[in-house]
Amino acid sequence: MDITLIRTFLEVAASGSFVNASERLLVTQSAVSLRVARLEESLGKQLFMRSKAGAELTPAGREFERYALSLIKIWEEARQQVGVPEGFNKSLSIGAQYSLWPRLGFPWIDLMQDSMPTLNIRAELGMPDRIMRFLVEGIVQIGLMYSPQLRPGLTARKILDEELVLAASWQASLDDISDHYVFVDWGPEFVHAHALEMSQLTNSGMTMSLGALAADYVRVRKAAAYLPARYIKRYLDRGELHLVPDAPIFPYPVWSVWRDDLEDDIRAVAESALVAIQSQIDGDQNAVIVELAQISEGESVEVLGKYDEFPNYK
């Protein structure tokens, strides 16, 4: 059976639309329709009910979805195992958002390979929905992200709270940055708290949904933005960015999502390495928060908004 047809079927099922599936797969809508039609012809069953609202699985489609996920998982396991280079006997694929690779994902890989030199590692980049899909399909075994979703066969664990701090490319106060502020969209909780408590910065004229990548924009321009403390510490140390005194921080949880069928020895190495990296990140973040407290009135740091952990994973 053509694995491309199965991937297309799962994409339509996940997105609920032939149009959305075509955008995610980077093919035309007609190509998606043709692939699904070929699959339906092979199975002798209609898999989707089409309507103006999108595409909904038929009873046969829901039944086939379980097998489709199993087929993709077996294919990925075979592909990764067969593709293990000479000299390696284990394979691990991990995915993470861009903001989580520097200072977290890359050092994590280093420690895992130090502990298990025969471990072959594949790294993937993506937004949470893409990484979650890869996890469900078995393309990756562990994912690092800000907004996980609950799925059967997966377990999520909070690694740490990313401390978002307000930083500028020059030494500035809160009153100085309104004309140079870049709004980085860190999700609905941040947007809501920011609108309520930082109303003087809501009309910035510049919005970015780039995560930590926005730091590279801010530091070479007269600009300011909320950025991850651990990510920008190197820029603070070099004087390329400066903390804004009296600006509140925003805790933003980072999650690891694990496939439940990950091999025990690989899981143990990955968990141990992640704990070690977490300690280092905590140290970097604490140093930034201490510096912010020292330059703020009363030597204290306020928290932006009422913060709660991700409800599905308490």
Image: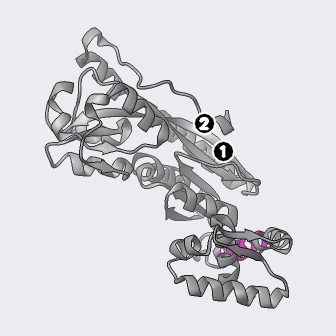
What's drawn in magenta, residue-wise?
69-79
Residue 314: x percent and y percent? 67, 32
> As displayed, is residue 97 above or below residue 25?
above
Q: Position of residue 117 (x, y in %)?
A: 56, 60
- The residue where tag 2 is placed is 310
Quadrant of res 60: bottom right
Q: Alpha carbon of mark 2 to alpha carbon of mark 1: how far?
A: 10 Å
- Check disc 1 and report the residue beneath it: 156
Any part of residue 41 in sight: yes
Q: Give the left or right position of residue 273, taking residue 261 as reference.
A: left
Q: Are circles 2 and 1 on residues that touch, CB within 8 Å?
A: yes
Name the dominant secondary structure of the magenta segment: helix
Please state the horizontal and vertical placement of residue 313, each as a whole percent of the image: 67, 38
Query: Foreground residue, 304 or 50?
Result: 50
Q: Is residue 25 left or right of residue 241?
A: right
Mark 2 crowdedness (10 Å alpha carbons): few <14, some 14-19, many ≥20: some
Q: Is residue 119 left or right of residue 200?
A: right
